[in-house]
Image (cartoon, rainbow, N blue to C red):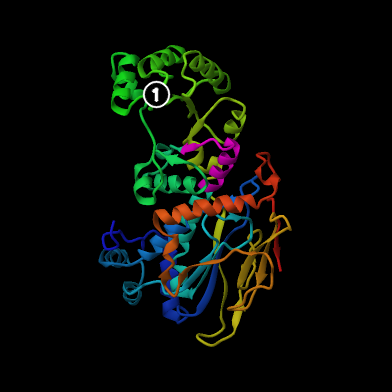
Amino acid sequence: MTESSAPSSALLTDRYELTMLDAALLDGTYDRECVFEAFTRRLPAGRRYGILAGTGRLLELIDRFRFGDDELEYLRDNRVVRQETLDWLADYRFSGTIRGYREGEVFFPGSPFLIVDAPFAEGVILETLILSVFNYDSAVASAAARMVTAAGGRPIAEMGSRRASERSAVAAARAAYVAGFSATSNLEAGRTWGVPTMGTAAHAFTLLHDSEEDAFRAQVAAMGPGTTLLVDTFDVEKAIETAVRVAGPGLGAIRLDSGDLPNLVRRVRDQLDRLGATETRITVTNDLDEFTIAALSSSPVDSYGVGTSVVTGSGSPASGMVYKLVAHRERDGDGEWVAVAKKSDGKPSIGGRKHPVRRLDSDGRAVAEVVHIVEAGGTPDDTGRDLLVPLITDGELHREHLGAEGAKRAREHREAAMRELPDQAFRLGRGDPVLPTIFA
């Protein structure tokens, strides 16, 4: 899709973003220089780390955050804002600067993973877009990373498109790939983000034919003996015998989508070996999550397919992320910077411009997340790993974060970041965040 044909993302927002803008234009505070930051207040109960995902998607959406004739007509017809505000929106282009964690980075409560420097009007109307992308994508990636760890190096495919909305399905496939999944069933994720795709046949294909053998022969004729045959439509033992007879001992794989998997997988492996199909792989796809995958760690499973659990964040479909104004100029242009913070009971924030650093020990293992309060343009005197990278500078996107190449870079960074974590981070039992967040 070319930039000119890409749909606007400007109305993927909450009404109060624009009514705040409307009021700020009226009272003259709209162009006051501000610092916004996004962070999570807490990890889902029992989780020890999170994985940030969605950066590449967000940058493309910000690039398309433009109010064209259709968007302006809707706002005008529904009297959302005044005509003067519509005139301002017609020329809107984000001209500020955004820095943040690399996509794929590990995150912890309180540490700002995104910092936006912009006039109030330009920064505030991005709030909903920023949070909708990061809250969902990071929930998927955080759950997916736990599944990847539980799989112990065995490949996992994402196949949850039918358990999410059509656009969320694409986002979920991308986030799972960033987190270490090897493939997706979703073709749009393959086209847009370069995620490898996979898939062969469902039970409907078997039921279409007069016999299971006819279905297997048709699939092998179309896809070759290296295909994956689904063997639990009727009787697994008979289906495996038929599959090997039809495809030969070079049958690529069989898929199990039901049953008592630990016991079934062992019986299936023994049967395949007796039939001479010693290289035929076994993939399982039956309502898996990180806990069931871990329970199969000693079984002769070769690969997994995960659907519902990954696209719903394995029970935590959002990441608790918020977007807060933390500093602004006292007066337009040349005034002093003023730290501002929310003091609501149970939801306080910490004011001031911040700079997060990850401290490592002599072995390169992470020991703490340190968030420094800094002056404008300042950087902390800290030997830890600097977590901020430029994403948008004066309105210009850093394009290395975009597209399929950006998703691949994020996947590689996630792997490197997780290698820094202490071993207790990877326990599936409930626990506190594995690193403390320290404000310095």
Question: In what quadrant of the picture does the N terminus appear?
Answer: bottom left
The residue sitting at the right extreme is 362
Q: Which residue is mark 1?
A: 229
**Figure quadrant of residue 3:** bottom left
Q: Is residue 154 above or below residue 9?
A: above
Q: Is residue 436 magenta?
A: no
Q: Is residue 335 visible?
A: yes
Q: Position of residue 322 (x, y in %)?
A: 55, 60
Measuring from the top left, give residue 304's x and y in whole percent: 50, 32
From the image, give the main secondary structure of the stretch colored magenta: helix
Task: Give whichever of 185, 128 is nearer the camera.
Answer: 185
Residue 208 to residue 337: above or below:
above
Image point (30%, 59%), residue name: 6
Residue 202 vs 182, above or below: the answer is: above
Seen in the image, is 387 located left or right of residue 93?
right
Q: How many residues crowd mark 1 within 10 Å: few (<14), some (14–19), many (20+)?
A: many
Front residue of 427/126: it is: 427
Q: Secondary structure at mark 1?
A: strand
For residue 52, say whether it is visible. no
Residue closest to the eye, 400 or 12? 400
How many circles with numbers are drawn on the protein?
1
Residue 440 occupies which quadrant of the picture?
bottom right
| Residue at the extreme bottom of the image, as rendered | 334
Q: Nearer the viewer, residue 24 or 9?
A: 9
Amino acid at pointer 1: Leu
Q: Residue at x 29, y 23 (%)?
A: 221
Q: Is residue 286 left or right of residue 39?
A: left
| First to last magenta residue range | 140-157
Question: Is 28 positioned to the left or the right of 204 in the image?
Answer: right
Q: Position of residue 80 (x, y in %)?
A: 36, 66
Q: Position of residue 193 (x, y in %)?
A: 39, 51
Q: Is residue 154 magenta?
A: yes
